[in-house]
Image (cartoon, grey):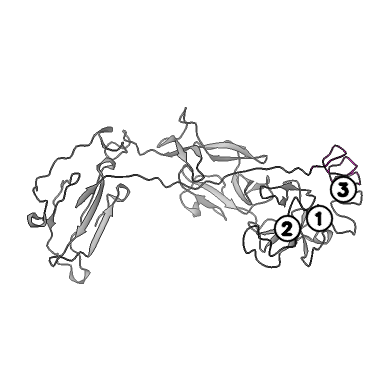
Amino acid sequence: MEVFSMSRYWVLLALLAIFSWGCDDGGETDGDADGDADADGDSDGDGDSDGDADGDSDGDSDGDPQPPGSLCDCDDGCLDVEGHDAICVFGICMTRASATCSGGGSTEECAEGSRCWGMTGQEGSICWPDCDAYDCAGDCDGDGSCVMTDETSCDPDCGSYCESGGDVTGDIGGACLYDEECGGDAFCNFGVGWVDGYCVASGCGPVGSECGEGGICAQFSSSTYCMGSCDEGCRPGYECIESDGVEFCYPGCDIHTDDCPGGYFCDDVVLESGGVDQLCRMDFRCSDLHPADGECDDGEVCEEGECVTFECDDDSLEPNDSQADAVPLTEGVEGLRICNRDNDWYTLAPTDAGDDGLLHVVGIHSYWGSGDLEIELEMADGSQPNTATLQPDSYNAEY
């Protein structure tokens, strides 16, 4: 067996990046940025603020279908575009895609001025109007598409997309280990930073509305997720953050006060995006909690809760550094050691295992600072049926 120097790698949970953008139509002459001569903030010139041209405030046009991006209550209040059927999507006029989107933002399935995306929790593909092609009565997202807001809505009796894809249920934001513990259609998000797990559900709507038990609907890029509300505070290891006017509990800590719960500590964690965030992670450092197998720096091992310089002494079966010097192992041998750049050889006699082919069960353990193990099984005829390299996170196993 040979011992090589050890490298440690942390696998991090890709956390969702939250962005917000604004839109600016420009070209205003009346002080409201809509380009008409009234002061209502839309572009219909009628003095109200609903985006239609009939002078009322219901979002329809009393018979005149409105173009994509306009407010709507029903599908028939929206205008078909180049053979694409009009649909009302949570209060914003859009059109139906001719086929399933070939990719996010595809233009092949939509008329000019719109792009194709799906919608979390909903069936079918939708042509979302571009803000630079249509006046947008909703918000412009980071892709430049006109989207609904938490203030827009429509009538589910006559609008295609006016209800969320099912009521979100479950204990949102609660601790968990398995999906089943969250209940309903919520699932357990469990990884670096998500202390004790976090119940979350996808496909809620509209943004800012209550969802599940103790949850609030938040926007993440082009998807919505039901997150734990800040109303009753956040659990240790989580902070109340705000995005697009919605406040919810999200992983975070203060590295200066180390406000993580017991068994965790606050650390700078490098995200997949390249950014750095302060998150609570499980504390495997050498301490009274981990007095024998805690983490230490390279070249150190944990002894009685303290990191000390790693020193390796030969065991009682040395010298056995070559196949010719292999030492027979009998049942119940314990406390054998192998040091850096060393080769140790042992012989094992087959057991009476019948057709199972069992040779021996060997338990292996190593400190984090002691290196990785390469293990080879060589038969009497020189063949090698098995070779394994074990890193510290796979130790304490039996082979």
Q: Where is residue 76 drawn, in percent x and y? A: 83, 62
**Disc 3 on helix, strand or loop?**
loop
Q: Main secondary structure of the magenta part?
A: loop
3D distance between C-alphas at marks 1 and 2: 20 Å
Q: Which residue is mark 2?
A: 114
**Disc 1 on helix, strand or loop?**
loop
10 Å neighbourhood of mark 1: few (<14), some, or many (≥20)? many
Mark closer to the observer (3, 2): 2
Q: Which residue is mark 3?
A: 57
**Left or right of 16, for residue 313:** left
Q: Amino acid at mark 1?
A: Asp
Q: Amino acid at mark 3?
A: Ser
Q: Residue at x 9, y 45 (%)?
A: 316
Image position of 158 with respect to 294: above or below = below
Q: Which residues are magenta?
A: 26-47
**Left or right of 135, for residue 12:** left
Q: Residue at x 30, y 49 (%)?
A: 391
Q: Earlier in the sequence, mark 1 or mark 2?
A: 1
